[in-house]
Amino acid sequence: MSDCLIKAFSGCACPPGECAEKPVTPAPVTFVSWRTQAIACLAFGFLAAIVTAAWMETQFKTQDLSHQEQVSWK
């Protein structure tokens, strides 16, 4: 049976009477709605913005502490 499926999908011609059956179930195809895609994209963007803001805060805090003696407030 598996040999017949391989020959059926590979595109090579089989001798008459051999491997005449077709696959019983087609390959599954799933579609994600545009609303689900939009919600996932917004959620991922929001999460990325929060993580980036937290990382930038730590970077700027250490940078400000290391340069605070060089800053003049004239």
Image (cartoon, rainbow, N blue to C red):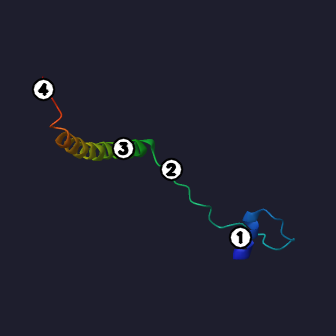
Q: Which mark sits nearer the N-terminus, 3 or 1?
A: 1
Query: Label 2 vs label 4: CA separation?
Result: 59 Å
Q: Which mark is residue 39?
A: 3
Q: Position of residue 51 (x, y in %)?
A: 28, 47
- Asked which secondary structure carries label 1, the reply is helix
Foreground residue, 74 or 37? 74
Disc 3 versus disc 2: nearer the observer: 3
Q: Is 43 situated left or right of 26 in this image?
A: left
Of marks 2 and 4, the one in the foreground: 4
- x 71%, y 70%: residue: 5
Q: Are marks 3 and 2 in contact (CB under 8 Å)?
A: no
In the rendering, which numbered label is found on residue 73? 4
Q: Earlier in the sequence, mark 3 or mark 2?
A: 2
Q: Secondary structure at mark 4?
A: loop
Q: SS class of the residue under badge 3?
A: helix
Residue at (19, 43) in percent of width and height: 66
The residue that mark 1 highlights is 5
- Residue 13 lies in what quarter of the image? bottom right
From the image, tell me which residue sits under label 2.
Answer: 31
Marked residue nearer the N-terminal end (2 or 4):
2
Observer-side mark, 4 or 1, equals 4
Instruction: Measure the alpha-carbon separation of dots 3 and 1.
Output: 40 Å
- Type of amino acid at the residue the image marks with label 2: Phe
